[in-house]
Image: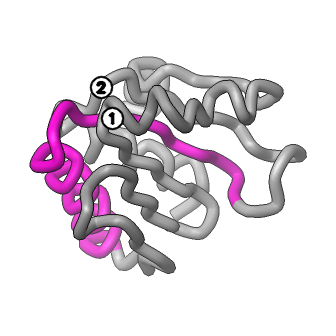
Amino acid sequence: MDTKELLTLAVKAIDDKNGHQTIAMDMQGISLVADYFVVTHGNSETQVEAIAREVKNAAQEQGIEVKRLEGLSEARWVLIDLKDVVVHVFHKDERLYYNLEKLWADAKTIEADTILQTNS
């Protein structure tokens, strides 16, 4: 599975659990950590956990190794490392506080709808 397909898989899993304001940040040439960061949020710990589990399960069903999954027990900021795509699932309050979009403002952002339409 190439990086764009992996990105689409993650965004689709988020969309299936009604993640809010989902964006992908193109980190190529900006960060050595991953090609894309995906950022979304849920309105409760339960929703954050459901989104994170859906991304993890979707990846594993496709034989993709989840390199790291952190924060699931608190469900305030869950990080799912899929190697070339790193997914950040925030509780809405934490997303506002950490504001990754501002921190990585030099990254091109892609709306979830664009990803889903382009790759469907």
> What x and y, as percent, mark residue 117?
40, 21
Residue plotted at (55% across, 37% down) = 98
> What x and y, as percent, mark residue 9?
37, 50
Residue plotted at (41% across, 70% down) = 70
- SS type, badge 1: strand
Q: Is residue 85 above or below residue 94?
A: below
Q: Is residue 63 above or below residue 79?
A: below
Residue stretch rendered in magenta on the structure: 34-62
> What x and y, as percent, mark residue 76?
31, 50
Query: Is 110 situated left or right of 103 in this image?
Result: left
The magenta stretch spans residue 37 = yes
Of the residues shown, which amino acid type is indicated by label 2?
His
Q: How is the image coloured?
A: one colour
> Of the residues under marks 2 and 1, which one precedes in the sequence?
2
The magenta stretch spans residue 46 = yes
Please tell me how crowded label 1 is: few (under 14), some (14-19), or many (20+) other residues with Cα within 10 Å: many
* Disc ID at residue 41: 1
Residue plotted at (57% across, 56% down) = 85
Q: How many marks?
A: 2
- SS type, badge 2: strand
* Disc ID at residue 52: none
Query: Is 8 situated left or right of 45 in this image?
Result: right
Query: Is 4 situated left or right of 57 in this image?
Result: right
Q: Quadrant of residue 112?
A: top left
Of the residues shown, which amino acid type is indicated by label 1?
His
Please tell me how crowded label 2 is: few (under 14), some (14-19), or many (20+) other residues with Cα within 10 Å: some
Q: Which residue position is annotated with label 2?
A: 20
Q: Are marks 2 and 1 in contact (CB under 8 Å)?
A: yes
Query: Is 94 situated left or right of 111 in this image?
Result: left
| Residue at mark 2 to residue at mark 1: CA–CA distance | 5 Å
